[in-house]
Image (cartoon, rainbow, N blue to C red):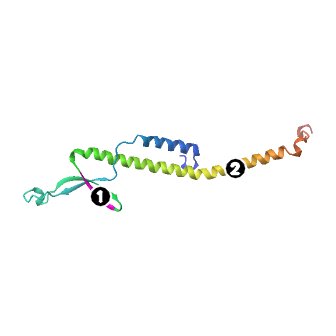
Amino acid sequence: MERKGNLSIGVLRVRRDAKVKELANAKPMIEGSLCKVGTRCGNPNCRCARGEKHTAHILTRKIAGKTKTNYVPVGMLEEVQAWVDEHRRVKGLMKKISRLNEQILRAHVPTSRAVARNRDLASRTRAKCTGPCSGTTFPDSSSG
């Protein structure tokens, strides 16, 4: 299996661009976790007063370090779950895009150094060939 550290910048950019295209197909989303909780209604004659709590769903998330909670109506449960799933998918895509960009950044320095070394080597080779020795002919070693 090919290690990501050995991939060229071009391959990394193609992979990143594919992830960005996936990101463009994002649907409605919401940050948070959907939780199932037991609640009491307050009626002393209800089953919840005897310990059998009612089931409710809430969406929890952190805002400025504090947990915020919203009640999720039963009729919206599937829709809100899809929003939460989409947020997780998009968040994962953004993390992958960020990692690919980091790899591109890390690969750029060695690549640009190698290009500069090759340019210097080529210019030195050209300088040697176009200098005063360019008109000098060397005997053919095969004609002995």
Q: Nearer the viewer, residue 16 or 66?
A: 66
Q: Quadrant of residue 36?
A: bottom left
In the image: residue 85, left or right of residue 40: right
Measuring 20% from the left and 53% from the top, which residue is drawn there?
Answer: 56
In the image: residue 28, left or right of residue 4: left
Q: Earlier in the sequence, mark 1 or mark 2?
A: 1
C-alpha gap between disc 1 and disc 2? 54 Å
Q: Judging from the image, what secondary structure is the residue with disc 1 in?
A: strand
Query: Is the residue under label 2 in contact with that under label 1 (CB below 8 Å)?
Result: no
Where's residue 75, x and y in %? 22, 44
Q: List the single residue furthest toward the front.
A: 64
Q: Name the amino acid type tagged 2.
A: Ala
Q: Main secondary structure of the magenta part?
A: strand
Please identify, in this view, whether the residue under mark 1 or under mark 2 is nearer the observer. Answer: 1
Q: Judging from the image, what secondary structure is the residue with disc 2 in?
A: helix
Measuring 9% from the left and 58% from the top, which residue is drawn there?
Answer: 43
Where's residue 32, x and y in %? 32, 53
Q: Which residue is mark 2?
A: 116
Where's residue 50, x and y in %? 11, 60
Q: Quadrant of residue 142?
A: top right
Q: Name the amino acid type tagged 1.
A: Lys
Q: Which residue is mark 1?
A: 68
Residue 103 highlighted magenta (yes or no): no
Q: Which image quadrant: the C terminus?
A: top right
Measuring 42% from the left and 49% from the top, which residue is drawn there?
Answer: 92
Magenta region: which residues? 66-71
Q: List the single residue furthest toward the left.
A: 45
